[in-house]
Image (cartoon, grey):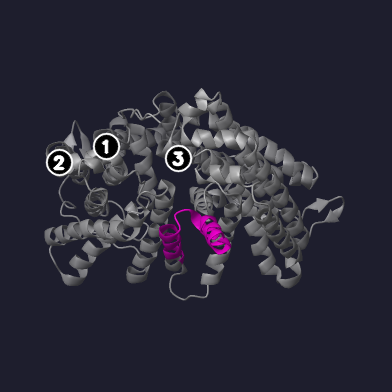
């Protein structure tokens, strides 16, 4: 509801608009300069944040806009990772091409998963998608000749146009793709699809009587979010250089969902904040001697209790208050 | 052969069912899928273990105190964590229970460590029943019996007491229930208390069949949700039967189709059932004009 109102209101005030643009530009410059200021591990964490942000952006279409819960995004992420890795390592396809080919493949799977899920809601949908996640993970695990099974797959550094992609190179590639993803998400969410999804979330009956084909838009939302997850997966595979079916479990799906909610449902900035929360906070807590899990869990609870609209909702409220 | 498999499946299924009932009580009344239910039950079970092992109470006393602890735990958690979230997005509350899940798990890990304990059962040394030559463990029979007793008691409570009627009213329409003088925060607290209580019973009954450690419930929780969805979440008996069916299906799929794909096949069955009946086998459709 608030999201819809905000979308309509955005073009209204010019100063807020240019302020936001300046902030986005500043963030982008900071992100470009970041590799200069951090060590190898820091760079890894930053890349991981961007990768998770991509997944969260995609999942946000489904959960934040269309109100559909998915617990199989770790599998989309995994299928994307495996498809990219197999195409690059075994078939010798160039990295960028296999990244998008893998994503196209995963998008098709996402659309297929969406079809039986159309009639399901809430927990029923969560369990059905969880089931698909288990099935996909199992297929990856058992198809040993192709995926290496439980032993996993070790990957060599990818090449783009003959040059080996270093960690910094991968960071910039991820940054570019995430920026494109952001731009795409921004456009789709403000366009016909985004508005249709928002109506579907509030009431499918109302959407139907407005001539919105709810089933079609739900399939589109599933497909888009699978595409984002798969691109992220293809990047992740070459970030860690070793993939294993165990990495793409239900637990990761639940983490993706938490990122979206922690950041703020239905907000694009929230997806990035949520991903950053999930990557950075456990790192900061690593120094605490007793049970970093305890503190992380407590933080999760506290964020939800004090900011039910997520981190982004909180920021926006603070911003609005300071402007008055 | 098949009878043995079915009985084994039922034994596993009734473990899922115990957890499933606890989840569904909270879910039906508050709309919140409580992902911390498993860890709440685990904590109560560890408490019972400590009462027996550390304090030296006999089984029955320890179990009763732990069940009371479960009730209290549910109410406290509802008051501290869930109450501020009433009226907010349901997903926020669900993620909060997820955080709670992590908190309780590490808390138990800090107190009792991550080693495994064997939880005693008063029925451990009773000989199994023989039904037509198939041995059935006493534990399973007790679990199924206790599950049925809980379902009957809950149904009676929800149908024939004022508090129970209030709970049902709140679960159907919070605004109207409030206009009728039902306190939403109170019904939510009662639901969480009951969930905690049943969870503690489930933990104490489940622990002897598994090993007691901090991950006691993590496998059961997802299966309980899946079985509940299969049966239909708004019918207690549906959840019970769904969980039992899930256990049996798992065992049969593992033996006759492929042991490594047992989980995947079970989930495919659930998805197939849901495409035909999106509200679960025994679930009723709630018509909402929205």
Q: Position of residue A140 (x, y in %)?
A: 59, 42
User: A46 left or right of B108?
Assistant: right
SS category of the residue bearing label 2: helix
Q: Is residue B114 visible?
A: no
Q: CA distance from mark 2 to mark 1?
A: 18 Å
User: B114 left or right of A222?
Assistant: left
Q: Position of residue B183 (x, y in %)?
A: 23, 48
Q: CA distance from mark 3 to mark 2?
A: 30 Å
SS category of the residue bearing label 1: helix
Give the residue number, with chain letter if any, for mark 2.
Answer: B157
Between disc 3 and disc 2, the foreground one is 2
Quadrant location of the C terminus of chain A in the rendered image: bottom right
Vertical placement of residue B219 versus B246, above or below: below
Q: Chain of mark 3?
A: A
Residue toward you, B55 or B192: B192
Residue toward you, B19 or B92: B92
Residues at marks 2 and 1, common chain?
Answer: yes
Residue toward you, B243 or B279: B279
Q: Chain of mark 2?
A: B
**What's the magenta region?**
A296-324
Q: Is residue A132 visible?
A: yes
Q: Residue at x 32, y 69 (%)?
A: B112
Reply yes or no: does residue A305 show up in magenta: yes
Circle on res. B240? 1
Residue toward you, A299 or A22: A22
- Residue, far right: A162
| Main secondary structure of the magenta stretch | helix
Structural crowding at the residue carrying mark 1, measured as other residues with C-alpha within 10 Å and reported as few (<14), some (14–19) or many (≥20): many
Reply yes or no: does residue A189 show up in magenta: no
Q: CA distance from mark 1 to mark 3?
A: 19 Å
Structural crowding at the residue carrying mark 2, measured as other residues with C-alpha within 10 Å and reported as few (<14), some (14–19) or many (≥20): some
Give the residue number, with chain letter if any, for mark 3.
Answer: A126
């Amino acid at each position: 509801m608030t999201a819809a109102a905000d979308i309509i209101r955005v073009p209204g005030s010019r100063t807020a608009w240019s302020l936001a643009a300046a902030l986005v530009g500043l963030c982008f410059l900071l992100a470009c300069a970041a590799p200069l200021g951090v060590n190898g591990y820091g760079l890894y964490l930053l890349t991981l944040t961007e990768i998770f942000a991509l997944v969260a952006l995609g999942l946000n279409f489904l959960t934040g806009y269309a109100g559909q819960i998915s617990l199989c995004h770790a599998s989309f992420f995994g299928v994307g990772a495996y498809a990219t890795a197999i195409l690059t390592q075994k078939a010798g396809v160039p990295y960028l091409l296999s990244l998008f080919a893998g994503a196209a493949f995963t998008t098709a799977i996402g659309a297929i998963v969406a079809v039986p899920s159309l009639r399901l809601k809430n927990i029923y949908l969560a369990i059905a998608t969880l089931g698909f996640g288990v099935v996909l993970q199992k297929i990856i695990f058992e198809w040993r000749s192709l995926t290496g099974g439980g032993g996993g797959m070790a990957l060599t550094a990818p090449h783009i146009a003959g040059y080996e992609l270093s960690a910094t190179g991968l960071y910039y590639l991820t940054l570019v793709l995430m920026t494109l993803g952001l731009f795409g998400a921004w456009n789709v969410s403000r366009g016909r699809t985004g508005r249709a999804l928002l109506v579907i979330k509030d009431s499918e009956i109302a959407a139907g009587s407005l001539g919105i084909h709810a089933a079609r838009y739900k399939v589109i939302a599933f497909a888009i979010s699978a595409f984002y997850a798969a691109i992220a997966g293809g990047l992740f595979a070459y970030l860690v250089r070793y993939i294993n079916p165990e990495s793409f479990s239900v637990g990761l799906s639940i983490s993706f969902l938490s990122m979206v909610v922690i950041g703020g449902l239905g907000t694009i900035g929230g997806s990035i904040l949520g991903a950053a929360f999930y990557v950075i906070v456990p790192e900061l807590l690593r120094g605490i001697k007793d049970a970093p899990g305890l503190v992380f869990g407590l933080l999760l609870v506290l964020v939800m209790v004090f900011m039910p609209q997520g981190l982004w909702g909180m920021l926006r409220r603070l911003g609005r208050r300071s402007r008055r | 052969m098949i009878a043995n498999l079915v009985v084994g499946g039922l034994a596993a299924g009734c473990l899922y069912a115990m957890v499933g009932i606890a989840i569904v009580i909270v879910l039906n009344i508050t709309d919140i899928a409580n992902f911390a239910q498993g860890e709440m039950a685990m904590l109560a079970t560890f408490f019972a273990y400590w009462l027996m092992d550390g304090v030296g109470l006999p089984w029955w006393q320890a179990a009763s105190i732990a069940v009371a602890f479960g009730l209290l735990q549910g109410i406290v958690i509802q008051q501290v964590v869930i109450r501020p979230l009433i009226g907010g997005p349901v997903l926020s509350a669900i993620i909060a229970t997820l955080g709670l899940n992590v908190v309780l798990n590490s808390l138990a890990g800090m107190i009792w460590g991550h080693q495994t304990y064997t939880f005693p059962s008063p029925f451990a040394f009773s000989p199994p029943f023989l039904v037509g030559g198939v041995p059935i463990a006493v534990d399973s029979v007790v679990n199924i019996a206790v599950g049925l007793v809980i379902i009957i008691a809950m149904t009676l409570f929800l149908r024939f007491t004022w508090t129970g009627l209030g709970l049902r009213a709140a679960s159907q329409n919070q605004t109207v229930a409030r206009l009728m003088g039902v306190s939403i925060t109170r019904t939510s607290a009662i639901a969480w208390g009951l969930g905690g209580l049943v969870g503690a019973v489930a933990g104490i009954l489940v622990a002897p069949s598994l090993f007691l450690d901090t991950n006691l419930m993590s496998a059961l929780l997802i299966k309980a949700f899946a079985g509940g969805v299969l049966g239909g979440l708004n019918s207690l008996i549906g959840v019970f039967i769904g969980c039992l069916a899930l256990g049996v299906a798992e065992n049969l799929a593992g033996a006759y189709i492929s042991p490594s794909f047992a989980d995947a096949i079970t989930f495919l069955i659930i998805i197939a059932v849901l495409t035909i009946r999106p509200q679960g086998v025994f679930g009723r459709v709630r018509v909402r004009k929205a």
